[in-house]
Image (tube, rainbow, N blue to C red):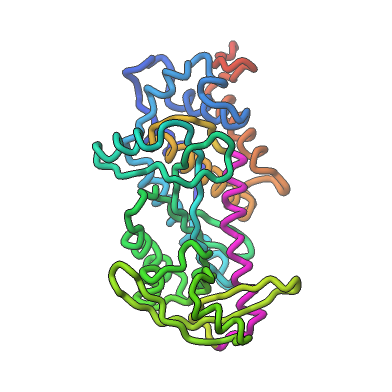
Amino acid sequence: MNTNEMRDEFFKISLSQGHHNAKYTVMQLALMILSCIRGKESFEEGAKAPSAQTLRDRLLLDSEWLAYFHDCMWHLAEHLVRLLRRVQWRISIDETYEPFFGDRKKLNALLVAQGLGKLVLGYRAKTPGATGSFGFLVVSLCCCRVKLPIAIWPIPEGEPYEPWLELVLKRLLELVPGAIVLADRGFAHTRFFLMLERLGARYVVRLQVHSNTIKRKIGRNQRRFSYWMTERKTGEKALLTVRVVYDSRGQCYVLATSEDKALLVTLLAWYGQRWDIENIFKDADRVLLPTSSRNPAMRLYCAVLSFFLSALWQVGRLTRMLPKGISLRGFVKRIITALGDLLCCAVSAVGQLLLRTA
């Protein structure tokens, strides 16, 4: 697996060859983008020559870079599953959010008119001044050695994500049969459980304790019981096996699971592994290209690029293509140095691309 070729091809797909300030090559623009990531600067803060406007003009936000990212992640997953045959795999699902500052209703109205749906959610993620968030659904394939972001998709407000998610999970479960699906309380609704039943998936999902029926059973100290979850709008029902688990600090976890014969301590350990995906988010944040753009495609591009870089870093460390102990930000610095040597140029401290003289 040549991860350098994957990285370069991603930039070639997402950047135009010319039209806007064509004197800069695609890989020179890629070098400037990576320099902004390393400095945690937006285009406006970190790019002088080429300018921020040149970078925005040369970005092909409507090209096939998202499909290419997904293809790369699948190829990496297939390679890693063959390489790590004896580990236990798990599939973690969660949402990540990027704060939005501005008139959320106005932008959503514009996006709906364009047929994109309400892509700015009301969730503010405790960010001061934020009026909403761009939300992305992320599916990951994890084990004790690697945490791979497999797929990412924007979340339109009020629209079901299960059709897209079911296709991803079906393919993953064909690749790693027996992998357990882990999710937090935000996914504990009838449609999600019915989808898992159709797939025949093993799962551990934490429930929200809103139902009086569940509260009464917990109050009677029942550790295991069945519960019919009902979708209010459609009347659909899912029969769940519920296990009530307490950790060492007395924290109560109400878990819906297909593994009704598993020990409580095992269920709690499985659910704890859901934090794999939170660690993926933390890694991606370290190499996130900052942007306050109102364009949802730009927000998605920045998120995808950060997940892409963190995935390539993990694979490089696992396959020993990278020096032992190299950090994620050190990995980005290494790419910048390699590209600079290849292109015979460098990025100055003020964001100017400088050609090296012989």
Quadrant that contains the C terminus: top right
Residue 263 location (% of width, % of height): 63, 85
132 w.r.t. 139: above or below: above
Q: Quadrant of residue 23?
A: top left
Residue at figure coordinates x 46%, y 43% from the top left? 304
Residue at figure coordinates x 43%, y 56% from the top left? 74
Residue 191 seen in this snapshot: yes
286 w.r.t. 42: above or below: below
Q: Nearer the viewer, residue 214 or 182?
A: 214
Predominant SS along the magenta part: helix
> Does residue 20 belong to the magenta stretch?
no
Residue 118 location (% of width, % of height): 34, 44
Q: Nearer the viewer, residue 127 or 197?
A: 127
Q: Quadrant of residue 41?
A: top right
Residue at figure coordinates x 53%, y 71% from the top left? 209
Residue 261 location (% of width, % of height): 56, 88
Residue 115 location (% of width, % of height): 24, 41
The magenta segment: 261-287
Question: Which residue in the rendered view is the most extreme toward the right?
Answer: 249
Q: Quadrant of residue 196?
A: bottom left
Residue at figure coordinates x 61%, y 73% from the top left? 253
Q: Nearer the viewer, residue 74 or 298?
A: 298
117 w.r.t. 159: above or below: above
**Left or right of residue 252: residue 152:** left
Q: Nearer the viewer, residue 100 or 140?
A: 100
Residue 5 seen in this snapshot: no
